[in-house]
Amino acid sequence: MHNDCKPAPAGFIYYAPMPKRLVGDSLAALGLGTICGGGFVGAETQRGPDGLAGTVFAPKLGTEPTVPTQFLGYYPERQTWRSAPGGLHYVGTVNVSPPAPEALLRRDALQGHAVEMAEGRLWHVPIARGWTEQENEVRWYINLPRRSRLNAEGQWEAGDVVERYARLFKIACDFWDSALGCDQSGRFEFGDAHAAAVEVLATNYLLGPVEADMLGILSDASVRKVLEALIDWPAFIELARSPRPTPPAA
């Protein structure tokens, strides 16, 4: 009897030309500090995609690696590798278990909109600035974790967005200004918009620019959808178009 079950999707694998004991302290320099922030598992190899000795490793999600440990080695006939810009490390995939959104989703992913990306799959984009209706008015609110603070009257209130998501909130505020035409800096033109979209997706997924390119998820249209989801644009449009009661005559 044939087993037609396909292997489950895996995450990305990485290679750096250094012994395993040095990888942990080098993650930030490699540009992998966020992707591997939850830890990693790895194995040394005598020959990597650059022909040198080094370490093949994969991030952890919780206590589990995103790639089965039998793939943590350099097997060129079973893997696809690509050099990251600058050549400091390589990013790879397992041919029989290519990466998919569910294999890259962080355990503490933020809630938001499901957005269909350029390759046709749904990815969950966090909402940083949400919209609601209060007292017959459309109002925005911060939809990210915030620190509590004690005000001058001795009362506790919601404070600034926690540091982990401060950059995400800034992208949302800047894109809102750009969408309304208040920001003429051009910071959301082609390249910057793509970079911002990757940062937004990286909040919920273990990926960066190289991973996004290998997945084929970005296009002009999908980048726009990601940034619009970040500011809850679909909800804003729906609320703005909804009829509201006419105030009673004085």
Image: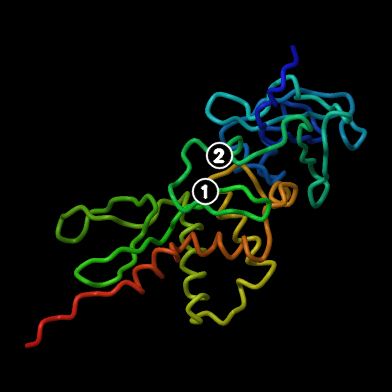
- Cα–Cα span, label 1 and label 2: 9 Å
Give the residue furthest to the top.
1
Q: Residue at x 41, y 51 (%)?
A: 162
Location of the C terminus (image quadrant):
bottom left
Q: Which mark is residue 45?
A: none
Find residue 170 and report its horizontal and vertical position in percent.
48, 63
Disc 1 to disc 2: CB gap under 8 Å: yes
Judge whether 40 appears above or below 90 on screen. Answer: above
In the rendered structure, which amino acid carries the disc numbered 2? Leu
Left or right of 14 on screen, residue 115: left
**Which residue is under mark 1?**
124
Q: Position of residue 142 (x, y in %)?
A: 36, 59
Numbered circle sitting on residue 105: 2
Please name the amino acid that badge 1 sits on. His
Q: Identify the image quadrant of the N terminus.
A: top right
Which residue is painted at 89% across and 28% down in the image? 47
In screen coordinates, is 94 left or right of 198?
right
Give SS at disc 2.
loop
Question: Is residue 221 positioned above or below 24 on the image?
Answer: below
Identify the element where label 1 is drawn: strand
